Amino acid sequence: MKPVIEMKNIVKNYQVGTVVVHALRGIDLKIFEGEFVAIMGASGSGKSTLMNLIGCLDTASSGDYLLDDLNVNSLTKDEYADIRNQKIGFVFQGFNLLPRTTALENVELPLLYDRHERIKNPRQQAIKALESVRLADRIHHVPNQLSGGQQQRVAVARALVNNPAIILADEPTGNLDSRTSIDVMSVFQKLNDQGKTIILVTHEPDIARFAKRTIKLQDGKITEDREITVPKKASEVLATMQGDEDEME
Amino acid sequence: MKWNRIQKIAFKSILKNKMRSILTSLGIIIGVCSVIVMVAVGQGSQARIEEQINSLGTNLLMVFPSHSRMGGVSRGAGSFNMMKLSDCDKILQQATHVMYVSPVIRSGGQIIGGTGNWSTSIYGVSTQYLAIKDWDLANGNFFTEKDIKAKKKVAVLGQTIVDQLFPDSDPVGQKIRIRNTPFIVIGVLAKKGQSGMGQDQDDVILAPSTTVLYRLKGGDRIDMIYVSATSINEMDLAQTEVEEILRKEHKIDYGEDDDFMVRTQTEITEMASATSKTLTLLLGAIAGVSLIVGGIGIMNIMLVSVTERTREIGIRLSIGARSKDVLTQFLAESITLSLIGGLLGILLAVGISLFMNKFTEINTVINPTIVLMSVLFAGAVGVFFGYYPARKAANLNPIDALRYE
């Protein structure tokens, strides 16, 4: 298996006024195709910084970063934008859907910014992505007509519509109740079963246990990197729960 | 991104904020509308002035007898009038850029007929006089070449004369006496109203040139000649021709002064329209300022919109929009707003000017060039005032933009 992400001695410093903040102090990390990785850590541990670097939203102060065999250390702003468009699918804590815009149009959006137009029929592809997160009957709803769980599934659909190398989820369950959280995790597990590489940033151990591998960060360094041989199955947990059915609809 | 996609996104976000979009466009709507209406009012008054001057006649050249010199002593205007009826015939025969010619022999006096008497002017003219003056008959007929040859005592009355002498009856066929010479009324002129100088143009009697010259006035000199050029562009050529013909007729040698002078209508028109052109320019400039104010309104709203939609911009950037995409999106929005404003402004302006033409005394003429210019200007305002907010949006950092609450 080839690594999708390869980081060598990544350092990230911030200048805050006169003080230099060392957010990341030398990260070495390899993530392979088809992995489901949970990056954990308390706030201030540097996990958000790491996630911004992985997502090509920010550049490292030093070190090498290979994404899908492409060195992304020194690229222009536009090239970063293209990489975000083609290689990475983002899922955010606050869903970050465009308001007053239908689910379908939200999912379609990354395809509209693809300047190579690799996907010829954006609408069709967006419908397929929404079907894969069980939202085929909600495609013409706008975000405030959808529940939190549904909104996050729309966000997941948007993340995978471009067929990216990795799906990057930043606290995707942070705004959801526990039952809905597990429902969203089941979607991620299903996608992972289909071969998608998923990187999840979370501070909740309950959520991290659905991943196949957990990485713990502390003070800008990796302190623990552990394989979970038998991760919990979200769909099974869901079946045992007696929650209200509203969220499932 | 393709242009149609950008345009689609721009339209969508404009439609999402209908009220705000309308209010923003309102500045441009009013700006464009006032530019068009103001210029239309200015040009309308200009057109009216020109129309009044043109009512003197079409493509008119006026030939007057000039002062003559005898051994270096000027004798004053008209002191030695050399113009004869035969000059008119020669001009008509020889000049190629001349359509109509008519002599004018002025006479005047007391006329008696119908219910009373009246003092007025009598003009001896040719059959082409009405065509030159762009005048119609209200009633009856005009005299013919035959009447001129026969020096027939027939007259065509102006409306004022009819009102004075024949208020209740049809004057055609009736007899009037001009300075004790009996004339038969054969026609009545249409009402022409006041001239540009405030003269009552209807207080006149027209009669065959020969009749007036030989039966009323005496002598063989005529007061002036009206010449109508074939078109407005050929007035200069016509003037040259008339001058050459008259010099030859009057046997004026090379180097000697003319004993006549030619005046054109354009000279008068140009003077009058210069004033109203300045007025139009002033009105347009004031209205143009309101268009710029409208543009500032767009900039204001776009800045608010960029701040308000920081998160949206963050989302777009994070899923792969380039800075340029965001820039064009916001620029497209402001241009679309200003162009829609411009188009609505045109519609409003057309409505207002139609209303003014119909229900008020103010005459308006909508100028297509000004319409086109004001729309282009509105678009330029959109670009100019939209660029700064759009650039602000495009330069946002995606991480900060996503975190923005």
Image (spheres, coloured by chain):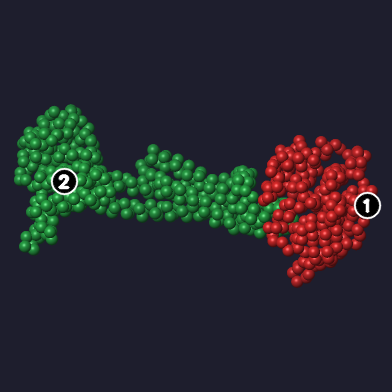
Eye-nearest disc, 1 or 2: 2
Q: Position of residue B355 (x, y in %)?
A: 42, 39
Q: Residues within 10 Å of mark 2 (few under 14, many from 20)?
A: few
Label of residue B94 in the image:
2
Q: Quadrant of the C terminus of chain B?
A: bottom right
Reading the image, the residue beneath label 1 is A228
Which residue appears at 76% of the width and 40% of the height? A128
Does dot 2 land on a helix, a strand or a loop? helix
Residue type (three-letter) at the residue carrying disc 2: Gln
Q: Is residue B189 left or right of residue A123?
A: left
Chain under label 2?
A: B
Kindly indicate which chain is depicted in green in the rendered structure: B
Residue at far bottom of view: A18
Instruction: Specify the quadrant of the image occupied by residue A53.
Output: bottom right
Kindly indicate which chain is depicted in red in the rendered structure: A
Vertical order, B188 against B240 (above or below): above
Q: Position of residue B179 (x, y in %)?
A: 7, 38
Which residue appears at 40% of the width and 41% of the height? B356
Q: Position of residue B48 (x, y in %)?
A: 32, 45
Mark count: 2
Residue type (three-letter) at the residue carrying disc 1: Ile
